[in-house]
Image (cartoon, helix red, strand yellow):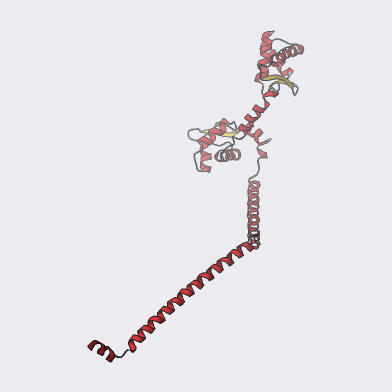
Amino acid sequence: MEKLTLYIESLIFASQDPISINDILDTLEANLEQIYAEEDILSHIEILKEKYNADEFSFELVGISNGYQFMTKGTYHPIIGQYLKLQSRKRLSRSALETLAIIAYKQPMTKSAVEQIRGVNCDYAVQKLVEKELIEIEGRSDGPGRPLLYATSNKFMDHFGLQNLGDLPKLKEIVVAEENEDITAIATIRSGDNTEESTSTDIEDYTPENSNEESETENNVVEIDNDQIAGEGELHNIDSVETAASKEINNESSNESPVSIVNAEEE
């Protein structure tokens, strides 16, 4: 019976979705070739519940969606939430998105065909898309060397919410969406220009409260300049007086008769 408990535990642990009692019974009967009652399975599930309810485990066995699944205990939800936030930030690069789009619309296709369209090497982008399980190898081409063919996976459908490849947006829809984005961007830029113009007008019309103080300061500066001009005028007048005096002296010296000068020299 202990072995049966381990079998049930392994099935619940390996299942990505909640596993039902009927699926457990069918698996056990097919593998062990023995018929079990539903009550036996439920009793072993209760044993597992008691085991994982202990504080030494960070997860527990929970009945959900008509089945059973191991889930993290509520105490550890904050740290799990932080981890999920970090995972959500790991987005695809632009080159990976371009490669994925080409494969989605042209699948199945080889890596060399993708490189022909993009014009650059796509080894790294294809490798990352395969690692993230967004594309998968569908087979080999009949061309030289029989290169691998890539196509989108079921995870790609789940990630983008598509039921089939027919739900992919048409290229015309993408072009129209891009044109609408361009129109919106132009309108935003124009509205921004109008805002700048109105702002500049407001700045021109704006009169600071301290404008009177500034005008008084300018008047003081003008008065100081006038004083300087007056001082310079006085200095100019002094220079004029000195010039006039020197002229009078020269005139007096020129008016003396040459005879008197000669007589003075004879005496």
In the rendered view, tell whether residue 252 sits above or below residue 99.
Answer: below
Q: Is residue 255 above or below residue 82?
A: below
Quick check: can you spot residue 22?
yes
Q: Quarter holding the N terminus?
A: top right
Query: Relative to the observer, which residue lies in front, 106 or 182?
Result: 182
Most extreme residue toward the top, as rendered?
1
Residue 237, compared with residue 210, is above or below; it is below
| Looking at the image, residue 35 lies above or below residue 225 | above
Seen from the viewer's position, the closer of residues 9 and 247 is: 247
Q: Give coordinates of residue 92: x percent, y percent.
A: 58, 37
Give the residue furthest to the front: 267
Residue in view at x 56 percent, y 69 percent: 223
Residue at 56 percent of width and 31 percent of height: 130
Q: Whole-percent x and y of residue 143?
A: 50, 35
Q: Position of residue 211 (x, y in %)?
A: 63, 62
Closer to the camera in the image, 205 or 100: 205
Report the residue at 63% width, 57% height from top: 196
